[in-house]
Amino acid sequence: MKRLSTDRLWAIAVLTPSVILLAVFVYGFIFRTAYTSLTDWGNDPAQAFSLTPIIRFIGLQNYHDLFTSNLNVRFRQDLVSTLFFTVFFIVGCLGLGLSMALLLDRNPKAEGLWRTIFLFPMSLSFIVTGTIWRWMLQPQGGLNQLFHLNPASNGWLTSRDSVWSFDWNKLPLITATIVGLVLLWVAWLAFRDGQRTRTWVALGCAALLLLWALVIGPNVKLLPAPELHGFNIAFIGIIIAAIWQMSGYTMALYLAGLRGIPEELREASRVDGANEWNTYRHVIFPLLAPITLSAMIILGHISLKIFDLVFAMTGPDNGPTDVPALLMYITSFRQNALAVGAAIGTVLLLLVAVIIIPYLFSQFKTQEGHA
Amino acid sequence: MKKSIKNALVITAALGLTAQALAAGKIEIFSWWAGDEGPALAALIKLYETKYPSVKVDNAAVTGGAGTNAKAVLKTRMLGGDPPDSFQAHAGQELTGTWVVANRMEDLSSLYKSEGWSSKFPKAVIDLISYKGGIYSVPVDVHRSNVMWYVPANLKKWGVSAPKTWHDMLTVCTTLKAKGVATPLVMGENWTQQMIWESIATAMLGTKGWNDLWSGNLKFTDPKVVSTFSMYGNILDCANKDASGLSWQQATDRMLAGQAAFNIMGDWAAGYMTTTKKLKPGTDFAWSASPSTNGVFIMLADSFGLPKGVKNRAEVVNWLKVLGSKQGQDAFNPLKGSIAARTDSDLSKYGAYSQSAAKDWKKNTIVGSMVHGAAAPESFTSGFGSVNDDFVSNRDAKAAAQASQDLADKSRIGM
């Protein structure tokens, strides 16, 4: 008993410094940033960098402006861009990583060498990757020269076209419809499993949301005029570079997962008469699901906070390839609007939280389940 | 063992004391002159050190073009209450609109009086760095933003001459396109595009109109300003589509390679072409004021000021005296590729382009550049980058004018 308590004391003594540092430099600063985002710091240039600035609390005004003011079109485009970037980045990394892992899983010659080659890009920093790919994708750079493409029509990073545009004003409508449909699906699942209350609650919520989307949604106007946002073609270059950098990492994850699947399982499925494809589809891929989830979480938060890669590839002043983290930097340190910068930072934090928190939740739940 | 540690401590302390005794003072100079401009700054520092040998100069240069990184570092330091002794800022609104209005700079009027600078610098420059009767910085160099560059041999080959007005430019553009020159005017990334708008706006509004824009007397929504955007849109049709991927040097290269006819760029391009590319001014490349701006000098200048509450105030005042002196400016500018802000500099030290620019500097109407922080505060200039970006994509002159006006209101221009 006594030994245990000295152990505990040691544990506490060793952990305390990092707990304090975390409390101050992570949570304290998060709180400070969140508070700053609710003030008008920087709106008046005379107060922005004054030694004793007068900073007023203005509530959610900055957030309101970001989502609806005429001057913050760029922020809204950045949010849309981030969404598209995240989806393509994750899908690309998972797809490429899984294919590479499946190839390596068949024990090719010089497997170790291939593994190193595939994993190698990850050892570079995004700044280096960005610089290399900027050279390659430049109008008169590597790729266009290599394939004799016309620089005028192949603007990898310089295109100003966008596809899949939608009106920002319709955002409440689109969100409500999507969430409503998801709830309907949840209701269907619950109904199939015979959970009655769950079915009814989900069904009710879905009905409410869809009703709102149909009746009130079309009349909600965030902005006076329609404002189109879509997927900017110039992002393709950045997505290629990002996938090049991170797919080796997903490959390593998947390879570890594949090697962890006991040979008996594959044999059993063969004995049961499954062909190669069905073995993968019904035995191996379901076993890889947790790995896919962890990879998605890690890639997801990287893509949301991405800054250096874009900065290195297209610089801070290129609207078609802007991301919220870059805008936050420019807003705070060039436009001197410190509170607005803090608000953008807080929005980013919330977006990351949307991805991370459910994951943490599910992790704790499974751990409790095992205990 | 313990004794040796003690000895070491004593020696270190003694060394520290002597080092302090040797250097009677120190001064930290904060700038973004780290790359090509490094030697020019070194020449200034050398001059200062020969005049004040007892002062230790700490050259705190932060790399990054146009000070993008340095400005962020500077702002965090100022917010943290640790101002550098003297820091670089573009003369004009970038300094006054950020630091002077926040009451962070000392008034240098008395220095101007004692050094007799009021008659040495042009009045337009002193007006730019003044705020409510005080003068707040010492300009070291001057650059011109409205210069159009071309290769005379290429123009001759194509049978065109350098356009005098923006309407001429459109005509020349059509001619060149008919002869297979896809991009009559080459431009680079965002800020270089804004410089083209700046040239057009100064030309179409006149210098008075341009100044009115920044004093709030002329609204951006005025039809005259809207038409500058329309003209800008027409000019963009003569330019390359992949502009956002080009640095200004790459844009200049295209003009030199004959893939484009004209390039509008500040006069640092002259330094690039003569020093880096070893070209001969006047024959290998030539220049004129950007169309319709003959007689107008759109200027930008680097300047240093005296932040309040610095530790080494006397040393900083001496540093500023060196910066403003004829000797200091003539040591710095020939290396930097700029001209002296003073009108009495020794022109024999400068190259062919700079000599012509210095002549214009004395007799032209001087206005401040918006893109380079002279005419408008940082909050406006930074936001205008997005306005420009939207305009290049959608070419909606009215929307661009309205957005600029919203931005001007938010940046409190004319209030």
Image (tube, coloured by chain):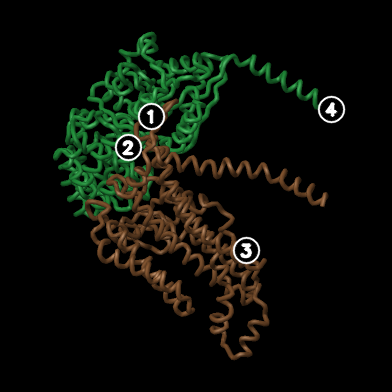
Chain colours: A brown, B green
Query: Identity of the amino acid at label 3?
Result: Thr
- For label 2, the residue is B381
Q: Which residue is painted at 29% across and 19% down in the image?
A: B122
Q: Chain under label 1?
A: A
Q: Chain under label 3?
A: A
Label 3 to label 1: alpha-carbon separation? 54 Å
Q: Chain under label 4?
A: B
Residue B149 is left or right of residue B73, and the answer is left
Q: Nearer the viewer, mark 4 or mark 1?
A: 1
Discs 4 and 1 lie in a common subunit: no
Label 4 to label 3: alpha-carbon separation? 50 Å
Viewer-nearest residue: B140 or B78? B78
Measured as percent of width and height from the top left, residue B329 is found at 40, 20
Query: Identity of the amino acid at label 4?
Result: Lys
For residue B223, above or below residue B24: below
Q: Earlier in the sequence, mark 3 or mark 1?
A: 1
Q: Chain under label 2?
A: B
Measured as percent of width and height from the top left, residue B296 is found at 22, 29
Q: Regarding mark 3 in the picture, which secondary structure is present there?
A: helix
Q: Earlier in the sequence, mark 2 or mark 4?
A: 4
For residue A220, say whether it is visible.
yes
Q: Residues within 10 Å of mark 3 (few under 14, many from 20)?
A: few
Label 2 to label 4: alpha-carbon separation? 61 Å
Query: Identity of the amino acid at label 1?
Result: Gln
Residue contact between numbered discs 2 and 4, judged by CB atoms under 8 Å? no
- For label 4, the residue is B2
Q: Residues within 10 Å of mark 2 (few under 14, many from 20)?
A: many
